[in-house]
Amino acid sequence: MNPPLELTVMMYHYVRAPGDVAEGGTGIPGLPVREFDAQLDELSGRHTFVTWPQVRAALQDEQPLPPSACLLTFDDGVRDHYLNVFRILRDRNLSGLFFIMDRHESKGLVLGHKIHFLLAKVGVHRLREVIWVGLNSEERQRFIEAESKYKLKYAPVSVGGQIDLLKYVLQRDMSTLAEPLLGELFELYIGCQDRIAQDYYLTTEQIHEMSAGGMYFGGHSRSHPWFDWIDAGAREAEIRASAACLREIEPGPWAFAYPYGGLSDDSPGLLNKHGFAAAFTTRPQVRHSDPYFIGRLDGEELSQIGDRYA
Ligand SMILES: [Zn+2]
């Protein structure tokens, strides 16, 4: 890209208020709805909001964006985006780009979301304890080794640091094991995963209503893995599943958001091959030199409430 693209891209996950339908008694926090509304007020004073097709045209046909352009993006396809975000954006005559996971194969929750439920229910100390009890001696050894590796990155002195450390271990080194183990813990502490997942993610009907209401959709993989942790074959399968899912919603080329912001050098080629024109990271940048590594600013971090649940 020459010259670099100047674009502020906001990234949001949960947008909810304690006790509202989106939060649903889970205790999982998110960006408060009022805070989101206030951020939009503030952003609209400094920026001109643009849509995904405008950004795509800037990337593909070098159609210039307005000065101080801002794109709103939302990750994970959670129900918050229909219940809270869509209503607010529609009232303001704004558009959003929503990165959804392909839900064709799994009816349950992705690993990251199982962890959110369990953390909210039992807390980080107890969760680590009950996971530990479920491991054999060889698995405990691997767990300890993974922890000591990430301890250098996430000094576990604060609760937030402990949560990040546990998430890293479970979502990367122990992910194969964590899937069934956390599935069992979920049934034990929370309830029927398939039923809860039905109320957790956007339904096909909601996606089509949002699409008809001026919203756009992008890919966010099928199972939400770290892309730098899985192999090239698995990455391609995740990207292909996203393309198949989006084909039923809107014409491409589409946008993609890397799960957890995990990067790998071969992703741009794979994304291009399967019909994606751009991909978004979690790097906090507003000037972008590569359409497959477009940085984003985290709305929760801006609101100073922390980013424990991204
Ligand atoms: Zn995600």
Image (cartoon, helix red, strand yellow):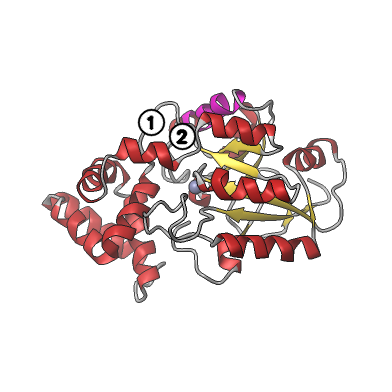
Q: Where's the N terminus, which quadrant?
A: top right
From the viewer's perspective, tell me whether residue 124 is left or right of residue 265. Answer: left
Residue 43, percent from left and from top: 74, 62
Foreground disc of the pair 2, 1: 1
Q: Tell whether position 239 is magenta.
A: yes
Q: Which residue is mark 1?
A: 106
From the viewer's perspective, tell me whether residue 175 is left or right of residue 98. Answer: left
Task: Indicate the amino acid at tag 1.
Answer: Ser
Q: Residue at x 69, y 36 (%)?
A: 213
Q: Secondary structure at mark 2?
A: loop
Chief SS of the magenta region: helix
Query: Mark 1 packing: few (<14 Cα in 10 Å), some, or many (20+)?
Result: few
Residue 255, percent from left and from top: 65, 38
Residue nearest the viewer, comparing 293 with 79: 79
Task: Indicate the amino acid at tag 2.
Answer: Arg
Q: Secondary structure at mark 1?
A: loop
Mark 2 and mark 1: Cα distance apart in space: 8 Å
Residue 105, percent from left and from top: 40, 27
Label 1 near ligand 1 (CB < 8 Å): no
Q: Which residue is mark 2?
A: 222
Q: Is residue 293 visible?
A: no
Residue 207, percent from left and from top: 58, 33
Magenta range: 237-247
Labelled pair 2, 1 in contact (Cβ < 8 Å): yes
Q: Residue at x 39, y 69 (%)?
A: 160
The dot on residue 162 is none
